[in-house]
Amino acid sequence: MSERRILSGMRATNPRLHLGNYEGALRNWIRLQSDYRVFCMVADYHALTTMGDVPPDLAYNSREVAKDYIAAGIDPDKSPIFIQSQVPEHAELHLIFSMVTGLGKLERVPTYKEKREDLAEGRQVSYGLLGYPVLQAADILLYRPYGVPVGKDQAPHLELSREVGRSFNAAFGAEVFPEFKDIIDDDDLRSKLPGLDVDENGQLRKMSKSYDNCIYLTDDADAVAQKVKSAFTTPSKMRKTDPGIPEGCAVCQYLKLYSPDWQTQWEEDRRGERGCMQNKNDLIERLNEFLVPFRERRKDLDDASIDAILKRGREEARDVASETMAEVRRAMRLI
Ligand code: TRP
């Protein structure tokens, strides 16, 4: 295959993707489809690294995430969509990579440090949580991609993946894994889209299922309206005539992305010529307009059609992955 490849993925922790997932990463995958073969993975194994007492329904979550990829604009005729655990080479390469990855390096990964602190008191840190980026390195390098489009928070994982590839090449004296590029949006708003609420200090915080502050790609028009109506705005703006601070207001932040008139709206908000309700109503209209094509594409997707798409995706992914594994085995003198 001569086409250049892109690889990316999202965890199947939840069955629903939100606007932050779209703006931070998916949007870029969609844009890349016209020039690259974009391999879109659903990372089901990765969802197990932070599970609580009840294991997630991975088969359900993975299917729903795959549907959201398509709803968002991934064209399954152009871009293979597949589930990580259905391509066993991921687990195999992960094992091999674990032999060339230093413990110190893994312990310094910021997401590991955060997750370890977040774990409830008394819960043990699993080997899988520490190895999370090693599995991600396998996910990426199996496809020897040109680039990997992800959200900004993933930059340390990509750096570690590159180091794992280099360590493998050095250890076995073969250039099996060429370097790949990070494709990360440097737009701060998109890469860290705020949720509808604020933290305990009154600051916007990122959209995340764990904060229950998300607009989901599958939300219908009423749900969007209801959520936007209860969204956080400038706390000192009680009346329309009070000056707003659009930089600290979730609704104004979204207007910047979804309303072509946002500059005027921001100025009017600042000058006290615009009320929060007016901003909210405008945003509801714009957001719903934006989500119409998502809803249209998703409504035709039943489980049988998504299963057929995932089967095709898996076959194409395995073709590439097994070729890489053959080279890995030769380089390691396993064969
Ligand atoms: N760690 C990524 C996230 O949390 C998901 C992921 C797993 C991934 N494997 C990947 C992303 C490979 C890019 C490439 O979003």
Image: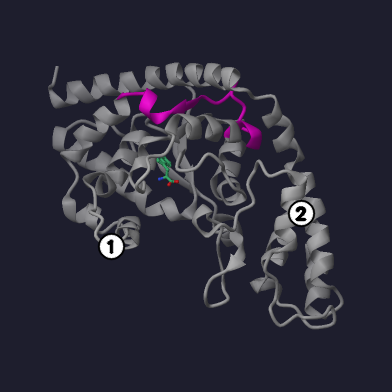
Based on the displayed image, in which of its 4 quarters is residue 298 positioned? Answer: top right
Determine if the C-beta at disc 2 is less than 8 A from ligand 1: no
Classify residue 198 as left or right of residue 151: right
What residue type is disc 2 on?
Ala
Above or below, 150 against 329 in this view is: below
Classify residue 97 as left or right of residue 317: left
Residue 225 tag number: 2
Above or below, 301 against 103 in this view is: above
Residue in the image at 61% along x and 38% along y: 31
Ligand 1 resides in the quarter of the picture at top left
Residue in the image at 60% along x and 60% along y: 195
Distance of mark 2 from mark 1, alpha carbons?
38 Å
Q: Which residues are magenta?
A: 69-88
Residue 121 tag number: 1
Give the image location of residue 256, x and y in percent: 72, 61
Above or below, 199 against 94 in this view is: below
Check the picture and name the quadrant holding the C terminus: top left
Residue in the image at 76% along x and 54% along y: 225
